Amino acid sequence: MIDRYTLPEMAKIWSRENRLQKWLDVEIAVTEAQAEKGIVPREALQTIKRRAKFDPQRVDEIEKKVKHDVIAFLTDVKENIGVEARYLHFGLTSSDVLDTALALQIREAGEIISKELDGLLEALKKRAIEHRETVMMGRTHGVHAEPITLGLKILSWYEETRRNSERLKRALDNISYGKISGSVGNYAHVDPEVEISVCKRLGLKPDPISTQVIQRDRHGEFLTTLAILASSLERFATEIRSLQRTEVRELEEPFHKGQKGSSSMPHKRNPEISERICGLARVVRSNALAALENIALWGERDISHSSVERVIFPDSTALVHYILRKFREVIEDLSIFPDRMLENLQKTKGLIFSQAVLSELVRKGLTREKAYEVVQRNAMKCWEGMEKSNADPPKVKKNAKSKVKDQNHKGDFKTLLLNDREAMKFLSPDELERCFELERYLRNVGNIYKRIL
């Protein structure tokens, strides 16, 4: 387990003490259910409940000799109970205890993650509303495409996070199953009614059909759900990293007083939290693959999955909990530079309005192929001019709905079009001017917000 990235509440769930306590909870619940059916004497049940306890160090000491963790645990507990201990673990196999207890731990861990998701959703919603009309450059393939708003970008993160929250709820429901069905799942030594009673006491559902274990597709679903969640966080963090690059610098993750970015370069303010999120997401995904490989066991059960799960469940839940917490901190204290966003909008000298010009030419009667040829010809001239020029980009108004100011120098896209006779046969100067208005790109923002919020 990676202690550095394990927050205290998650560490408690996967502690050795809690694991053994969950085993004891299952054993006591079984004894209670069997007492109700007259299998275990009531007096014996009371003695077991009163005296049952364990000492992790004693369990370890016994396990060194017997080489079996559940037997070591039971031996320790029975030493404390005395003669009535013969009714403990009556008719059970180890996996009855292990799988049912694991479901309890996973559910506890999942509930903590779910609460953290709720906190992130609130933070994303707040930021999305706050920056609903903060205009920025939309990029595809890393290249300027068309204007969007920062609010829309964050709103997409919100909606994806909401889907992850729903996925997690479904996965938690599907993992919340116990089994008390014996060595091969046929209830040869335990009544099926005992399983129903035990699961009810523990807040679980009885597995409809188990072997010696609960089938591992349930566990695979849970860990792949965490992998998708981590991958979403990586997507969001990657975007912050991209937009924090010096050449772009539209966003910047928190950089606190006294923080250091580099051992050698004092000027550095690196997106190290976002990079950490991206790195740890890779671990969560690799753990999901291990969980999928655990599905195929020999016959009614082998033990190949057991050692793997002792690593992947604590680590994946701890890592997802941690990166959720860290990303929420990034979002809540994210630095945003709207002026820089507006400046970057103008770096391509109006090229980002090419589709508006294309559509207007088609609307005025040109074939799409001809209109595309006219617009692309001028766009390529504009690109060539930018490659030759190192001129500073002009300033624009901060009002998101204002027209982009005419740059009035040779080589900008609008000027090239105004000087293109073929284009201006179909467009008036005013019609061309309207193609360069930001309003057309923002007019449906409100509708998108209504869909989501």
Image (tube, grey):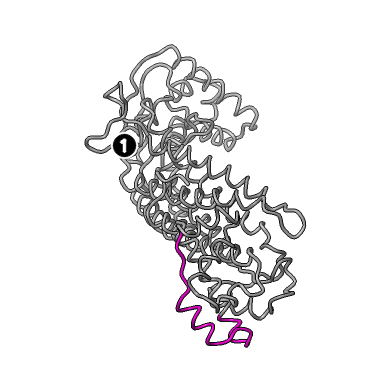
Return the x and y of residue 410 as percentages of the image width and height: 40, 16
Q: Amino acid at mark 1?
A: Phe
Q: Is residue 332 above or below residue 349?
A: below
The quarter of the image holding the C terminus is: bottom left
Q: Residue at x 51, y 62 (%)?
A: 105
Q: Which residue is mark 1?
A: 337
Provide the secondary structure element on which disc 1 rests.
Answer: loop
Return the x and y of residue 252 as percentages of the image width and height: 34, 36
Q: Is residue 238 above or below residue 49?
A: above
Tell me: 339 left or right of 201.
left
Q: Is residue 442 above or below residue 74?
A: above
Q: Residue at x 59, y 47 (%)?
A: 288
Q: Nearer the viewer, residue 224 or 394?
A: 224
Q: Which residues are magenta?
A: 32-56
Q: Residue at x 63, y 27 (%)?
A: 370
Q: Is residue 283 above or below residue 347?
A: below
Residue furthest to the top: 388
Return the x and y of residue 188 as percentages of the image width and height: 74, 74
Return the x and y of residue 136 as percentages of the image width and height: 40, 37
Q: Magenta stretch containing residue 45, yes or no?
A: yes
Q: How many marks?
A: 1
Tell me: 317 left or right of 41.
left
Label 1, residues with CA under 10 Å away: few <14, some 14-19, many ≥20: some
Image quadrant assignment for residue 9: bottom left
Q: Magenta stretch containing residue 29, yes or no?
A: no
